[in-house]
Structure formats: C-alpha cells, structure tokens
C-alpha cells in the first residue's frame, strides 16, 4: 500500500433555518475515497467528551461510527461550500457560494458544462448541482431521499473533493480525541450551510477504510452514519482434545499437537459495505512459525449469506482465488480474491433500485498445517505462533489506483511436549540397551511411531501416514524402537496432551522387562480465556500456565504385582517431564547345599576356557602351515 494519508469523504448539505424549526430528515450515504494530497488546515479542534466546537454558529453535524469501529483517532477537514438561508416559512431555501471555495467549485462545474471556470456563475453552479438530484423536493423541511453510491451526484462530489485538495484551500480540521457513549462525535459551532467533510485519517496498517457520506437537511442538527466500513479477521486453531470443554467444536486461540499431526486453522471475516466500489480486493496474509508446514492444497473459502453458518453459502472455485507461497515480507503465504464483490453480487444478489447490494456476508477460509520436526527444538514455551491479517480495497473513487488497507495481525499458538526417560536398576545404576515402544491405547495395538533424531526420537503422527491421528495409515519405513543409551537416557519429542502407554519391549541383558506398559497422562493447563491470545504471551505463564505429567507403573516382583502412581518432575518452559524406569536387580535361584552345582559351574567355566584356548592354538597352527 502506498505510504500516504487516505481519506474518507463526507459531503454534507445543511441549509439555514430559524432556531425554532424542527426537522426529521433522511441521511444519504455513498462510498468513495479521497485524493492523495491533504488540504491546508487553519485550526485543529479536538473532541473532548465527543464534541468539537468551531465557534462559528449554532449548527452541528453528528458523525456516527460503525458498530465495533471506533472514531477515535480519525481526522476530518471541514469545508463550508455554500451558505444557506431558509425562507421564513421554511417553504424555500437559498444557497450562496462561500468565496473561499468558489473557484474550486466553479472549476469542477465548468468542466461539466464545458466552460471555463472563471465564466461560470453562481446560479449555474447551483442549478447544475440541483440537476444531479434525482429525488428533488421543495422546501427546507421536506425529506430528501438518498442518492445512490453509483449516482452522478456521488461522482460530482468526489471530483469536488479532489479539486478542493488540489487547490490547497484552507479547512478546519477536527481530530476525534473522544466519542460519546454511542460511538459518535459532534462537529459543533457551525454556521448553517452546505458542507464537505473530508476524512484525512492515516490508515496504513490499521483498521480503516474510505467512505463518502452525504446528508442534505435544513435542520440545525444534521446526522450522518459513517460508511467507512472495513472488514475484520479472526484466526482460530482447532484443539483436538477436550473439545466440549474448549467449546465451539474446539475452535479457539490455543492448542497442542504431536509432531507430524495435521493442525486445522480457519479465518473468519466479513464483507464490509462495498457499495460505491467497482471491484473489491480481499487477501489474507499469513506468517507461520518454522515448525509449521503449510499445506497449500488444503485452502478452502466459503461465503455465507449472513453471520450464521447455517445460512445459504457458496464455496469458491479453485480459479476464483490465488495461493502464493512465496510472497516475501517474512510471510509464509497469501490467499487473494481479486474481486470478491463480483462473486458476492453474483451469488447473493439483493441489488435495489439504486444498484446497491446488501453486504455483511460471513467469509470463512480454512486450511491446515503440519507440525514438523523443527518443533523438537522448542517444546513447551513459547509455542508456535501463526499470524494473519487481511488486506482489503481502500479506494472507491471511480478513478481509483487500487490502494488497499490492512487489519491488524491476529495470532494463535500451539504447543508440544517432550519426555526425558532414564533407565536404571534399583541401585541407581544406569542401564544401556533397554528397548521401548509408545502406544496410544491400553491394549498397545496403535503404536505412536517414532523416528531417530539427533538428540532422541521424534513422534511420527499417523496423520502424515495417511491415517487419522493415532489410527490407520501405513507404518513408516523409518520407524524405530527407542533404546536407552550408555547413560540410560532417551528422549521422546513432540507429544500431545493426553494419555500414552510406554511399553518396555526388551530389558537390558540380565534384567527382567516390565510386563505392563507405563501409563503416562500428559496434562497441560491453559488460560481460561482461550479466545483472546496476545502475540508473545506463549512465552509467559499467561497461556500455558503449567504442565503436569503422571505415571502409573505396574510391575510383577517377588510373586506379586506392585502398582504406583507418581507425579513426574516437569519443566513447563521446556515442556518436559522426567521419567525414571527401574529394572530390579535379579537374585540367584536357590541351591540345595550340595557342592554339585558349584562343581558344575566351575567345570563349565573350565571347559569354556579350555575350548577357547584350544581354538586359538589350532588357528595359530593352521596359519603357520599356510605360511610354509
């Protein structure tokens, strides 16, 4: 987007009246956009308590913000194009040009009349503008119907605004420092007249959009609804565990997964009021942690008639959007719809007599990613963040240059964990060569495959094998058993929250293996506010608050079973739990007290020694003969 001040244009007509008159007028709204160069300003007026007082009269214009879109920070240049005077009975209204802007107005009208601006008279100006009114009524107090977003009047006001900016005539600026409780602000202290109010808010990187609003009323208190409507975007990640507790089918801002598992994401956004736009660009920009691998073919976009996903819907075809996996700017991918307005106007046709459609459709984009092996290097905090922001058309001028605005980034996060295993005997001697497999079920039928990594073993979730999480799929060729090293250690990286079964498949030489698997319960505790994640909070205790892991061990020893539950030592920052697996030292079988057994053992040892010595001698003699 160009680095410039974008503006929202408000053309407001306000005719003079006596102080005692009353009026119930109609507000007209048209979407448009402003020129690049700001006008000169005289004085900047803040809006303490939601009101600015320009000190020039008793009239006022109230600007109402859109729901959920604050006016605070917006800036408006105010031009009084005409003075206005009502007749005593209110049956007629008379306009006279404000000399400060007369040249600009005559220039624009002159182009429409094919005349030099200097030769255009005041009456010609007024008569031309009145000719654009397709809903003409007489009298200062008569209701004025709206002109449409695509009307000749809209384009005239757009040209007039551009000329005012180009000529650099002075304007009073109102900067909204505060609003009223209903998110409105009042531009007060105005003389009665016909006003153009041009928004000059800076919008790059913020929630903002361009709009032109028109009001024509004889009431001293004119009102206008802001039509600088912009979309919003909310990103969600779907937790696969405890969905009922999480709510919303698991869709929230926080989740945890295994390495290799498929992670579902979705963006929820809306179609703003696009009346006045010829086309409307709509694109999602996504930044993923390096531990996440984007699955391009998973992208799907669905538009719903309203905020309910049970309403009429339309799924975009593959040729109606573009996925770019190399967009630059540190982004992982973009998904762009070059003209979403065209699609909505076609599929949700509610166009009225003014050629305006009804907008507000819900737009849902879904895609998924895979938690890859990079996750092993950063288990626990801070987690793996994924950000999205929406880019949207921000220039509805009929000669627009395709300028766009952006929503703020919205972020979700996921976590994964690791298990540090130490194999010892009951005298703390570290044991090498013990073998283990990991399972997701108590019967040990569904193996959680692992592969050898540089510092341990990484989980291979079955999603990446054609299965579904812990079932199905094809056994990977690189799946291995886990083996304790010379220090009795091995590490399993990439565990999810939930229950696992660690089964010893082979004990170290001279030891009896455990008959029953060790039952591991991995239980992270997340914030209760799972739908308002703030970027960076994954590194603190605000999101992943703690990590608890318990182990249930059952062993057969001395003729009976022994069972115990143990809370493992954990480190929530590292996302780790420490498990010690003990093999009890075996005792010799009893003897009768005779020397027979001892003699047999000694004899066996002697025979073994004799056999080795004889083998070596025979081999040496054979080598000597070959040498001769």
Image (cartoon, rainbow, N blue to C red):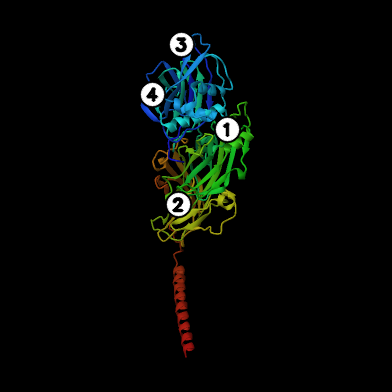
Q: Quadrant of residue 279?
A: top right
Q: Is residue 243 above or below residue 75?
A: below
Can you tell which of label 2 and label 1 is closer to the viewer? Answer: 1
Mark 1 burial class by Cα count in 10 Å: few <14, some 14-19, many 20+: many
Q: Relative to the observer, which residue lies in front, 92 or 425?
A: 92
Question: Disc 3 marks which residue?
Answer: 18
Can you tell which of label 3 and label 1 is closer to the viewer? Answer: 3
Coordinates of residue 77 in the picture (x, y in percent): 42, 27
Can you tell which of label 3 and label 4 is closer to the viewer? Answer: 3
Identify the element where label 1 is drawn.
loop
Q: Relative to the observer, which residue lies in front, 298 or 581?
A: 298
Q: CA distance from mark 2 to mark 1?
A: 41 Å
Question: Disc 4 marks which residue?
Answer: 47
Residues at badges 2 and 1 in contact (C-beta under 8 Å)? no
Mark 3 burial class by Cα count in 10 Å: few <14, some 14-19, many 20+: some
User: Counting residues from the N terminus, which is met first, the one under dot 4 or under dot 1?
Assistant: 4
């Amino acid at each position: 987007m160009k680095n410039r001040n974008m503006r929202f244009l408000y053309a407001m007509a306000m005719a003079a009246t006596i102080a005692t008159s009353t009026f119930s007028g109609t507000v007209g709204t048209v979407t448009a956009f402003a020129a690049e160069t700001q006008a000169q300003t005289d004085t900047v007026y803040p809006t303490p308590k939601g009101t600015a007082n320009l000190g020039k009269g008793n009239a006022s214009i109230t600007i109402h913000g859109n729901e959920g879109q604050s006016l605070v920070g917006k800036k408006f240049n105010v031009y009084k194009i005409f003075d206005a005077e009502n007749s005593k009975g209110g049956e007629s209204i008379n306009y006279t040009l404000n000399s400060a802007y007369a040249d600009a107005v005559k220039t624009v009208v002159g182009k429409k009349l094919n005349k030099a601006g200097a030769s255009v008279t005041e009456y010609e100006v007024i008569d031309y503008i009145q000719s654009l009114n397709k809903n003409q009524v007489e009298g200062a107090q008569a209701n004025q119907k709206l002109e449409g977003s695509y009307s000749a009047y809209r384009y005239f006001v757009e040209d007039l605004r551009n000329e005012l900016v180009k000529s650099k005539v002075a304007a009073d600026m109102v900067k909204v420092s505060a609003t009223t409780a209903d998110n409105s602000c009042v531009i007060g202290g105005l003389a009665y007249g016909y006003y153009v109010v041009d928004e000059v808010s800076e919008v790059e990187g913020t929630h903002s959009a361009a709009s032109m609003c028109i009001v024509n009323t004889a009431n001293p208190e004119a009102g206008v609804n802001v039509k600088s409507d912009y979309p919003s975007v909310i990103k969600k990640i779907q937790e696969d565990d405890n969905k009922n507790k999480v709510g919303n089918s698991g869709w929230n801002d926080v989740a945890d997964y295994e390495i290799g598992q498929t992670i579902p994401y979705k963006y929820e956004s809306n179609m703003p009021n696009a009346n006045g736009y010829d086309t409307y660009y709509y694109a999602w920009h996504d930044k993923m942690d390096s531990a996440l691998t984007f699955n391009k073919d998973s992208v799907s976009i669905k538009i719903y008639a309203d905020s309910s996903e049970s309403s009429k819907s339309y799924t975009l075809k593959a040729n109606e959007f573009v996925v770019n996996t190399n967009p630059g700017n540190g982004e992982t991918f973009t998904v762009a719809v070059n003209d979403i307005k065209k699609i909505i106007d076609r599929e949700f046709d509610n166009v009225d007599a003014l050629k305006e459609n009804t907008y507000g459709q819900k737009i849902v984009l879904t895609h998924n990613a895979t938690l890859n092996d990079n996750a092993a290097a950063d288990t626990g905090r801070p987690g793996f963040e994924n950000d999205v922001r929406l880019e949207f058309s921000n220039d509805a001028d009929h000669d627009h240059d395709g300028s766009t605005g952006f929503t703020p980034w919205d972020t979700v996060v996921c976590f994964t964990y690791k298990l540090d295993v130490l194999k010892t005997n009951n005298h703390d001697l570290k044991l090498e060569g013990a073998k283990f497999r990991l399972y997701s079920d108590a019967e040990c039928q569904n193996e959680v495959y692992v592969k050898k990594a540089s510092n341990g073993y990484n989980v291979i979730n079955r999603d990446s094998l054609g299965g579904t999480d812990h079932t199905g799929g094809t056994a990977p060729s690189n799946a291995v058993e886990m083996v304790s090293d010379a220090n009795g250690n091995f590490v399993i990286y990439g565990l999810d929250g939930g229950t696992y079964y660690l089964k010893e498949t082979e004990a170290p030489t001279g030891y009896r293996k455990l008959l029953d698997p060790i039952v591991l319960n991995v239980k992270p505790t997340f914030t209760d506010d799972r739908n308002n994640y703030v970027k960076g909070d994954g590194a603190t205790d605000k999101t992943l608050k703690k990590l608890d892991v318990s182990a249930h061990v059952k062993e057969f020893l001395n003729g009976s079973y022994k069972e115990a539950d143990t809370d493992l030592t954990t480190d929530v920052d590292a996302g780790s739990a420490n498990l010690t697996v003990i093999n009890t030292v075996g005792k010799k079988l009893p003897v009768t007290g005779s020397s027979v057994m001892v003699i047999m053992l000694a004899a066996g040892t002697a025979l073994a020694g004799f056999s080795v010595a004889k083998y070596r001698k025979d081999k040496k003699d054979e080598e000597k003969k070959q040498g001769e």
